[in-house]
Every structure is written in structure tokens, then in C-alpha cells.
Amino acid sequence: MLLLIFVIACNPAKYVPSGETLLDRNYVKINNESIKKSEIFPYIRQKPNKRIFGARFHLGLYNLSNIKKERWPHNWLRNIGEEPVIFDRSAVDKSVEQIRAYLISKGYFDSRVSETIETAKKQTKVYYDIILNRPYTIHNITYEVEDTTIAKIVYFDSTACLIERGKPYDVETLQAERSRQERFIRDHGFYNFSAEHIYFRVDSTIPGRQVDIIYGIRNFMRIGHGNKPVLVPHMQYKLRNIYIYPDYNPRDFLAGAEEYQKRLDTIDYRGYFFVTAQKRPLINYDLLIQSLYLRPGYTFNQTSTERTHARLMSLRTYRLVNILYNEVEEMPEGGDYRYLDCIIQLTPVSRQSFSVELEGTNSGGNLGGALNFIYQNRNLFHGAEQFNLKLKGAYETFSQTTTGIKSTQEFGVETSLRLPKFFLPFLESENFIRKYTPSTTIQAAYNYQNLPVYTRTIANASFGYQWNQDAYRTHIVYPVQMNFVKIPSIEEEYYRNVIEKSSYLINSYKDVLIAGGSYSYIFSRQNIRRSRDNWFMRINVESSGNILRTAMKLAGVKPVTDSVYSHYNIFGQPFAQFVKGDIDIRYTRIINDISSIVFRGFAGAGIPFKNSLAMPFEKQYFEGGANGVRGWQVRSLGPGSYSPPESKYINQTGDIKLEANVEYRFKLFWILEGAVFVDAGNIWAIREDPDRPGAKFNLNKFYDDIAIGTGFGMRFDLKFVLLRADLGFKFRDPKYTGSDRWLLTRQSGTGNNMALVIAIGYPF
């Protein structure tokens, strides 16, 4: 693939007209590091052709075509490719002007920007040389506020001003302060106030490379007598009435507004006016009121308006939410403010739905399909409760090195009920609900799984809470999680040759009850301004059996003692006791509009104790596959340096997992994307296992057990789903010793050194 990129990028000036040159590169040189080069490049008007690994791949596609021919594939190659960027001298002059203007906006009023142009072999390089002196700093800030009421607000809030004395002059800071001040003033009831009323004047004649800033706020301009503009003080507004349309239908309103209004009745409930044609409310009025941050008689507040909109949408009961304001003409007696009427239009989604879904599945790189019958009720008890019922049948391939493709079948039923509040008496206050947008989820499911060498049934039930600390941080707590895992049958050959030979696996493949709870913390900026670099972090902590064992000890229940160990039973089977925690961190660095690099780190550990000799199989870690170290098939790597015997069903698991990944992603053409990656990691057992030598984690030499894989992949972005094929190569295999661990020095004939994984979605 890399060879292809370089070959088709040869002869880049093939279609450059005679007398013209191809823009090869732009270079930026700055005499100090106070301004980064990355800040300058957006102001360069002309960009060279896009590159992948230094080669102009898209230009190469264009050059493969014959520009004199219109038929396929020539027209197709030109459409998916990129025509040559012809060097434009005027664009350089405009770039110099823009760079100089940007530097002035950063306080470098006397910066110097020069350019050097070099041309050879019909290609041109442009060098931008920037000389910076010490930036101008802010000496003093003076306020000019014509409106006395607003002046009091501004002076009171002056400590929060983003413009600081002694800091470098920066236009970006001034713009941020303008936006901050606009919101702050609007939040104090000034409905018609906007950023256009805020201005700055800069006096750069102050000695010592300093500036004085005049921070001004103009009065409101309205049309007076004779249609002449008149400046008057800004008017403060309060909310008079709040009208809520809980079942607003925009289509009926547009079709006949007058007839539509006649069908509506107005109900006064707790000081709010509900305008509806329904005799029975579609959704509880109390729930709607507690979702509002707006109150009759309160001053207008922009932030409260936005939070109300977000809260109403989070109920998942409404398709559209519109919040409008109408100015009331009459003035209150003796008041220095005016009134606004607030209109909230809520367009519901369909309350009930039934659907049949055909979906693709990907479990650690094993592809499959599922047929789902789904029933949804988005307002079960008229309180925005979300009820879901799913009947599922699934078929999945299971890829193994020794036996090729096997299959698994799964049948099950899942139910869930989401309540838009905390189901706790002491956290039912409206203020708490408005601040954190909490929800309570109750789930129950039953699954039957027929795997290649054993069958398993899982029945689970859980009860948990979720709330948003802010736009980026989410907390999820499940104080109650119950899982009943049964293994009705295991293939005799697999049990005798694999499980029976490992005390760890014997204790893993058992019927077990998992009764505990979990907590998850999620920090994510991935969906906010996707064109920028972003972080994602997820922390999970869970435990099982600790409260149950303590309760049984206090109740005087005697443990069951068998040939292996002493443990407690409940419902005739042992329960798992463990603690487990892991952290997943991802950072996406946007390089340009066609490429990015993603870093990921994962660390996790589970510790079984007292009532358990091993972690339940469902809670163990595994490596390899489409979302792990991709040079290995799923579940075939580790634990540690242990080399499992040949088996028709490889299923290696462990208690500890460490993994790091780096992936460079780039767009090629049409729906096709490419990637090059390096993965490193492994799993380990937390205790010594004589049946799996080399499996135990050792802090002093765990790094010697790290497996390294590399490879490349192709992705097909179909918009509604992304299909992925990654070819991974084993670069360092810990199951070997000495130099044989490295692929480049390993002798031939020592095993399969690559794995092809086909999956859905990005690996991380």
C-alpha cells in the first residue's frame, strides 16, 4: 500500500501548464517560541496538495488520468483526486498581510514578516520568515458605560473580566470577553442586549510597549419621532406568563393557524399556562415544570433558557423543542422594566413503536448478525419513562487459527426502563434534577449462548443511576447488579484437554452468581468541535460478593467446604467475590482535514479473593482481535509468556491487562480510508498458576512479556456504518525466548505471524 502511494505520486508536475510551477511546500520560521508555527499556517492563503506519508497521493490519482478524456476511469480519477495547486504570487502577498494582521492581534505591533521563494524543477517552495519583538502588554483598563444600571452590573463583575493588566494584548481575549459580558448582561434580564453594544478602543501611545484599553458599552438605539434613531438606556425584562404547548403540532399550525388555535384549551397549573387540545395530559405537568429553569416573575435569563431547552430534549419524549419570547406592549405601573411572555412549543415523538432490526455485530473481531424484534414506549406512565423490550436472535462467526471459522448462536430477551429522575427520596428535589439531569435505569435480560465447545446461560438484573456533571463529564452508578451464570454443558474433549489441566480454568468455568455494583466516570470531548484535538477517558470500578459474604457471616451461615476451598453458597451455588478496576484513555490529534493520529492507553486489573479462587469468566480480560493487539487472533495472546497447547478452541484470559495503541488514519478517496497502526500489550494472571507457566504478572519483568504488533488497515465509511479490515503482523511475540521474540530476527517456520481481522467501527 505504501509503495502504491509513492508510485502514483511520481511526476507531480505532469499537468502543470508551461510557464507555471507547482506549489510544493510552505515553511514558517519564527525567531522565538512565543508564537507557534501551527498558529501561522491557517493564515497562509494557498495550501499545497495534500500528502500522506510525505507523498501527494490525491494529486497522483489525478495525474493517473488523461485530462483529454472524459470517459471512465479518467473522469473518476479526477473526481476522487486533487488537481495540482499552481503557485500564485499574489496569494503569497495576501498571506504576508494576513500573518502580519494576526501578529498585530496578538500584541506584536511591530513584527516583521518577509517571504523567500525558491523554484526548481517546476516546483516552488515558499519560506515565511517572522521576526518578533516583545509584545505590547495591557497597562490599564477604563470602563465607559453609558447605562447606569448596566454599569453597576459590569463593575460588580469586573473581577471576572478576562482582560488582565500586565498580560499581552490579544484580540482573541477581547472577543472572548465580549461574548462573556454579553451573556452575563443578558442573564440579568436585558433581553435586547447583544455583543454589538460592546466596543473596545486601544491606545498604543503609552510608553514602555504598553496599551490602555477603553472598555465601552453603548446605549440601546431605537427609532424615535420622525423615524430618527435615538439612544436610550437598555431595558430590563421580566417574565410575565409562561405558555407551554405540550403537544404542539407544527404541521397543523401551518395548515390553519386559526382553526388550530380554536381547538386548544388553556389550563392554569401551578402558575404556568398549559395550552393543549388533549383532555388528559400526554406527559405529567409536574415533570415538565421541574424541567424548567424559567419562572413567572423572574428576570429574563439566557442561560436558563438554554438549560431548559437541553433538559426538555433530554427527556427523549419530544422531537422538537422551541422556546420563544414575545415583548408585552404594556408597561408595569411604577416599574423600570418591561414584560416578556415565554412560549414553549413541545412536539412529541410517537409514544409507541415496534420495529424489526437486522444488525451486524462485532465481538472482539468476531463478525456476525442479529435479528431483533423491538418494542419501545417513550412515555410509559406519562412521566417520560422510556421502556424497551427486545427479543434477539444472533449468529456469530468465531475465528481460530487452528480450526478456521466456527460459529456461536445466541437467543435472548432484554428489557429496560429509564426514569428521568433519581429513584431516591432524598434526591428528588427539583433543583437537583435541573442541575444534573439525572436518570434511573432498571434492566433485566436472559441469554442463551451456544458456543463452539460449551453452552452458557446468563440471567441478569441491574438498577442504576446516571447524571451529567457538565457537558463533558458523566457519572454512572449501579449499586445493584445481579448475574446468574450457568454452564449446562462443556464438550468432553475440551474439558479434558484444556480446562482440567488448569486449576485457574477449572475455577473459571463454573456456575456462579455475580452480585455487586459498579461505578463509571466518563470524560469526553469527542462530540464537541470534532475538527479539534480531543480527549476521552473512562474509569470503571466494580465489586461483587463483599456485602453478600458479610451479611452471611453476620447471619451465622456456615460456609461449604469441599476438596478445594471453603466458600459460601446462595441459591445452591457459590457467588463470586472480587474487585475490579480499569481505565481507558484516548487522545485524537487532528493533523489536517484528511489525517489524524489517535493514541490509546488501557490498564485494568481484577482481584478475586475469599469466596473466589478465580475471576468469573465473564469478568476476565482477553487480548488480540479487532480491538486489541491486532497481530493476534482474538483471545489467542497471553497470558504473559505462556504458550497454550494446540486446541481447536483457544480462549486465553487473565486478571490483568495493559495495552497501548497508536493509529494514523487518513482519507484516501470516495468512501475509502486507510490506517497504519502499532499495538502493544498483554494479559496476565494475578496469581501463580503452575498449569500456565509464565502467566503470572511480575512487576519487575512484566515489560518482557509485552507483545507488539503492527500493520495497516482499510476502512469503508458508509456513513451509517464503518466497515474495517485490518491486517496485523506479530512484531514481538513474548511466548518465544531471546532474539526469536522479534519478527525480524526470528527463524522461519515458527508459526503464523499475521492475522486478518474484519470488524465494524473504529477499534477505539
Image (spheres, rainbow, N blue to C red):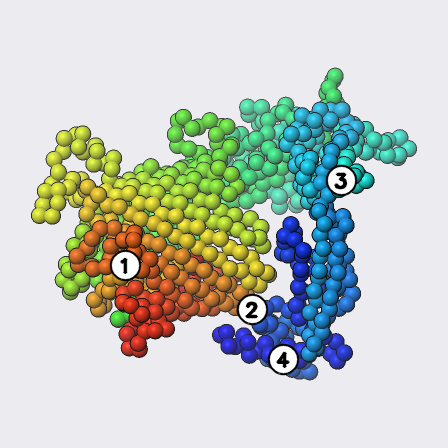
Which residue in the protein does label 2 denote? 52
- Could you say where residue 727 lies in the image, as x and y percent from the top left? 41, 69
Report the residue at 50% width, 49% height from top: 535
Q: Earlier in the sequence, mark 1 or mark 4?
A: 4
Where residue 488 sits, quadrant-wise, is: bottom left
Mark positioned earlier in the residue sequence (4 or 2): 4
Residue 371: numbered disc: none
Q: Marks 1 and 4, how far apart in space?
A: 49 Å
When asked about the image quadrant of residue 539, the answer is top left
Compared across the picture, whether 130 is left or right of 544 comes to: right
Residue most extreme to the left? 563
Q: Which mark is residue 11?
A: 4
Provide the secondary structure element on which disc 4 rests. loop
- Residue position for label 1: 640
Whichever of labels 1 and 2 marks the residue nearer the N terminus, that label is 2
**Amino acid type, label 3:** Gly
* Residue mark closest to the camera, 3 vs 4: 3
The amino acid sitting under disc 2 is Ile
Mark 3 surroundings: few (<14), some (14-19) or many (≥20) residues within 10 A: few
Element class at badge 3: loop
For residue 208, which numbered disc appears in the image? 3
